[in-house]
Amino acid sequence: MEPALPESWVPDEYLMALGRLAIEWASLEQFIDGLCVVAFNQLGGRQQLNEPLPRSFGRKVRFLRKAFTKLAALSRWKKEALALLTSLPVLSAQRHRLIHAAPYAWDEGGNVSLVKFRYEETDFYTDRSQASAAEIETLRKKIRTQSGRWMPICNGVLRVVFPNYFEKADGKFAR
């Protein structure tokens, strides 16, 4: 018989904070994905940037840096977008550490011990760290703020590319 983990083997507060973090990140990454696709397909990125449509997050950030720098249709959002793109890798690394590590212990103060194995060349290494629901919530708020700053850029780009899909003066959506 295999040993079973107890039902609540990690504090619920920690798990809920981690779930909220994952959802906030997914929302932010949808903005990034949408901008990549629109820049690539509708704004000349396929021809002018000489790059494939990116799949990994780091490549998406590099692609958008290039797109906001070189594509004329994105020029009005260049300054804000480039500033936001600078902070994305930091937020991504913080999220990655929390999402991809496994909890293995916790204390009464709410600190959870994490372990993550990583492979480098021919060996495995162990990264250990600690996190708490409060730390995760702080990161979630930073990601939410970042999403809020991307939203007007995305809306502006989409209104330029797909003007007939947005609401008319009477408040109804055009289709």
Image: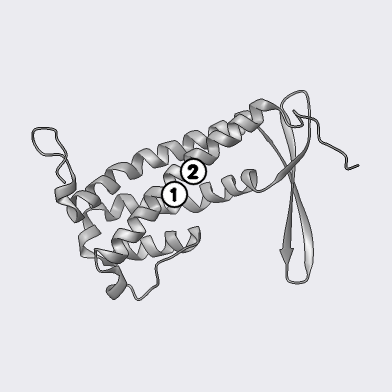
In the displayed structure, does residue 12 sit left or right of residue 39? right
Residue at 73% across / 63% down in the picture?
119
Mark 2 lies on a secondary structure that is: helix
In the displayed structure, does residue 134 sit left or right of residue 49? right
Which quadrant: the N terminus? top right
Q: Can the viewer see residue 68 in this picture? A: no
Query: Local crowd at mark 1 within 10 Å, few (<14), some, or many (≥20)?
Result: some
Question: Vertical placement of 73 versus 107: above or below?
Answer: below
Query: What is the three-letter code of the residue carrying label 1?
Result: Glu
Q: Looking at the picture, tell me which residue is in the foreground, 49 or 11.
A: 11
Query: Residue 38 at what x, y percent from top left?
Result: 29, 59
Q: Can the viewer see residue 145 in this picture? A: yes
Determine the image quadrant of residue 68: bottom left
Q: Which residue is mark 2?
A: 25
Q: Which residue is mark 1?
A: 29
Residue at 54% across / 41% down in the picture?
22
